[in-house]
Image: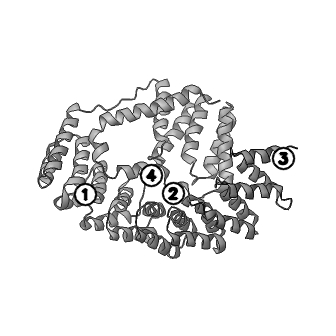
Amino acid sequence: MIDPKTLKRRKAGSRLRAGALALAGLLLAVAAAPAPARAQHKDLISRLVQSDGEAAASAYVAGRALLSEEKWAQAASVLSRFIGEHPSDRNRDAAMYWLAYAYEKQNKDREAEGVLNDLIQRYARSTWVDDAKVLSARLQAKRGVVVKVEENDPNDELRILALRTLCENDRMGCPARAAEVLRTSKSVRVKEAVIILLGRYGGAEAVPALVQMSRTEPDEKLRMRAISALGSTNDERGLEVLRELAMGATFADVSPADSAIHALSAHDSARAVAILGEVATRGQNQRARTHAIELLARRRGDNVVDELLRLYDAVPEVQVRKYVVAGLGMRKDARAHAKLVEIARSAPDVELRRQAIHSIPNRGEEQDLDVVLSLYDAERDNDLKKHLLGAIGRYQNQRAYQKLQQIVRNGSETLERRKAAISHLSRSKDPQVLRFLEDLLK
């Protein structure tokens, strides 16, 4: 089994991190408008986009199973192969952490540190990064290296709270006070908070300063804060610089381009939706393009569906179009549903059909099961039929159970699909399903 101490540490670590953030970022947690969007981004539709299929999922599960059996060398081999063969899979960050864990268990500390450093650099927003840092610090401690933690001036909290209170009560005076603090303070943390306050309370007068900082601020961290703050202002004057940054050739998970796309997604203007669509179709970096689609799909409003439908026809690459299809699966709109059904039935590219099949259940509408059932009965492609079976298995209701039971009983179905149907049924606690499974033993 996985080391119980590790599991306990992960739970305790989460509590400790939460407490530390509450103490060290009192205002940043309250004042930063983009923060909720970034927190939700841990589970964006990139995790709903099928990348390498069920083979990837099976390989990852196999690696985790070997870890639970404490077969460290075998687990490392399987996970290492999974990481190499499935570079875009949604579980790649988790697999990298567990690979490092398996290496550490074999005292292969150098290999473990290499994987952890790669994880931290490549997946800066991953929920596994904090665990990776803890494991990395443990490995460094074995070498006698003490990891130093930067200490904050406790008075910074008071300065931030004071400025926040002043800005809340005197919005007209906020830009001038903020400019003075930015000029005199040496604390990056205070400056970050000031920029956030400018975005929230500074109004129209703060926009020129934020635009300038977004373009020319030498400190990258402060520059990205200014870019995010532009999105919070909802002022149209900030859109052009956000567009310029989002359309750039370079992109990373924590970068000006990434911050610009987030800022556009937070901006209330209808023009921001159009710019996100432009980034998705004409951006120079494919990761930026798919990221724009991810965040576009999470916005409210019928115009988002309009834009996604337009993008499906406008985007040439299949991999990017899959993000559009996944985005349609996030919408309750009847037009999004109709488009998903059309793609699932008749798209010329089989990958797009798979993605649509995967996305229909994501809408959370039980009536969509009717469509999935009809698609299953009509489909002749064995691979697509397998994906449709998986979609049926995601509906936890009697009609889905009855269809799965029918598949198990049907001798003309392949053995693989009949076994998959039993696997889906095994996740149900429904008494009728349990009786059905018991009858199979007779």
Q: Which SS class for mark 1?
A: helix
Task: Read off the residue under disc 4.
Answer: 41
Label located before the other in sequence (1 or 4): 4
Q: How far apart are marks 2 and 4 (CA)?
A: 9 Å
Q: Which amino acid does label 3 sit on?
A: Leu
Label located before the other in sequence (3 or 4): 4
Q: Distance between the residues labelled 1 and 3?
A: 70 Å
Image x and y of residue 56, in percent: 65, 51
Q: Distance between the residues labelled 3 and 4?
A: 44 Å
Mark 4, other Cα within 10 Å: few <14 / some 14–19 / many ≥20: some
Q: Are marks 1 and 2 in contact (CB under 8 Å)?
A: no
Task: Read off the residue under disc 1.
Answer: 216
Q: What residue type is labelled 2?
A: Ile
Q: Distance between the residues labelled 1 and 4?
A: 27 Å
Is 394 situated left or right of 93 in this image? Answer: right
Label located before the other in sequence (1 or 2): 2
